[in-house]
Image (cartoon, rainbow, N blue to C red):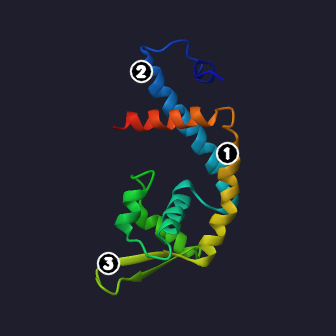
Amino acid sequence: MKLEDEIKQKSFKTPYHRMMVNIMFTGNWIQKDLASQLRKFDLSLQQHNVLSILKGQFPNPCTLGLIQERMLDRESNATRLVDKLMQKGLVNRCQCAENRRQVDIVITEAGLKLLEKTNAISEHIQDKYSNLTIEEATLLGNLLDKLRD
């Protein structure tokens, strides 16, 4: 459906304005879809992002700074997210042997198993975009990268 129909707006000031609103609308649309499906696993988008970062580093530990640096939403409170994931038994936190002021965070076996279960959600959401060809998806990704240059 066209953006104009979705948000009930007839026109935009410029094509750049339409593009900006469309990116924000579409990003929120994708996040809402993913968030609603992650709720079944008692996970927020940000918690899922932290687990994914830790899985990418596994078996090596991560610091809070590294997690914060790699977060999709860099305004998230990584400390609070790690605390919630610890309460759920999905991550462990321990003092670094080489630097006593540093805290190391590692995903647990339960965290890895939960991520395996949530893989189907991401695959299902990606399937919704199969109306784009691989070439179109690649082009769109490259154009979005170009916007951030």
State the residue at coordinates (44%, 17%): 15
Q: Are marks 3 and 1 in contact (CB under 8 Å)?
A: no
* Residue 39 higher or lower than 142, as above or below: below
* Residue 133 higher or lower than 103, as above or below: above
Which of the 4 quarters of the picture holds residue 119? bottom right
What number is the disc on residue 35? none
Instruction: Return the residue at label 3.
Output: 102
Instruction: Return the residue at label 2.
Output: 16
Q: Is the residue marked by circle 1 packed among few (<14), some (14-19), or many (20+) residues within 10 Å?
A: some
Q: CA distance from mark 2 to mark 3?
A: 44 Å
* Residue in front for this viewpoint, 138 or 7: 138
Mark 2: amino acid: Tyr
Q: Position of residue 93 (x, y in %)?
A: 45, 79
Q: Position of residue 120 (x, y in %)?
A: 70, 56
Q: Are marks 2 and 3 in contact (CB under 8 Å)?
A: no
Q: Are marks 2 and 1 in contact (CB under 8 Å)?
A: no
Instruction: Return the residue at label 1.
Output: 125
In the rendered structure, which disc, 2 or 1, sits on the residue that comes first in sequence?
2
Which quarter of the rendering shows the C terminus? top left
What element does badge 3 sit on? loop
